[in-house]
Image (cartoon, helix red, strand yellow):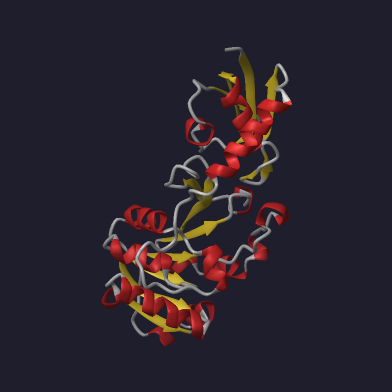
Amino acid sequence: MAEYNVSVGNLPAWIEPDELLGPGPWVRDDDRGRVRARAQLEVDAAADLVTRLRALPLAGRFLTVECSPQLSRAALRRAKAHDLERRRETTPGFRRPGTRLDQEGRFSLTPEALALELGRRARGRSIIDAGCGVGGNAIGFARAGCNVVAAIERSETRIRLARHNARVYRVDDRIRFIHGNALALLAEPERLGALKASILFVDPPWGRDWARDLPGIRDMPLLYGAVKLRARFDEVWAKLPPSFDPAELPDASFSAIFGASRGDRQRVKFLLARLPGGA
């Protein structure tokens, strides 16, 4: 088969090309603090990359994809059809029957496998989940052996759903759910009693149009407030949209969290930012 010279630009340096782009072998070139990856690919692999990645927002910039010679319309149509089919098999949210979600939870819930991955990365440390929603992240932390000293949610409906879902996963005795405004409670430690934690975790709402709107720190009040509280914790962790610009949190370390199913294994589901604290 004919080979195509493919080049993908504006990659953040902390993403391995193979994870996002698939098998290469990829040659990495530094491009003013970003990475350009290039390889020779067969037609279907080249068309897949062009379809998946061209103009995709990632870490504050849009990816660029160049391909030579030019791909045929037929190859691009095949790639688009394959991509649509692949999107049907994505990493599920809660897997156990009996869990309950509200409308927001249906599109914002951290998939179960990825919530467990966050828990494994925390390595049994103590966590405050500020804005726990329907409980996905708090449950993942608890199942991975972390001490969830508080999971706070301002919506009475969502905290009720979170408690129910924790019971389904049999970790309700390992999570202290608190109904209230997380930032207000954390700003007045005496209201939380003697609760202390190593990690403050936030999963701020992004909005459904994050890929178009490119939300920043001031668009996410929960994140903005958590950063102000960082001195009281060892670290602040934030689950952020793939489009978030790391330059807005210059002293944070970033990693890309990919899907766990066949359909999204090479898609960045979210970025994990880890900010050093002062505790």
Q: Residue at x 43, y 83 (%)?
A: 160
Q: Is residue 146 visible?
A: no
Q: Quadrant of the C terminus?
A: bottom left
Question: Relative to the observer, which residue lies in front, 251 or 67?
Answer: 67
Q: Position of residue 69 (x, y in %)?
A: 71, 16
Question: Relative to the observer, which residue lies in front, 196 or 113?
Answer: 113
243 left or right of 101? Answer: right
Q: How many marks?
A: 0
Q: Is residue 39 visible?
A: yes
Considering only vertical position in the picture, is 196 above or below 37?
below
Q: Residue at x 44, y 57 (%)?
A: 92
Q: Position of residue 167 (x, y in %)?
A: 31, 76
Q: Residue at x 66, y 42 (%)?
A: 56
Considering only vertical position in the picture, is 58 above or below 2?
below
Question: Relative to the observer, which residue lies in front, 52 or 89?
Answer: 89
272 left or right of 142? Answer: right
Point out the residue furthest to the top here. 2
Q: Position of residue 133 (x, y in %)?
A: 49, 73
Q: Position of residue 195 (x, y in %)?
A: 35, 78
141 left or right of 261? Answer: left
Q: Quadrant of the N terminus?
A: top right
Considering only vertical position in the picture, is 105 above or below 83?
below
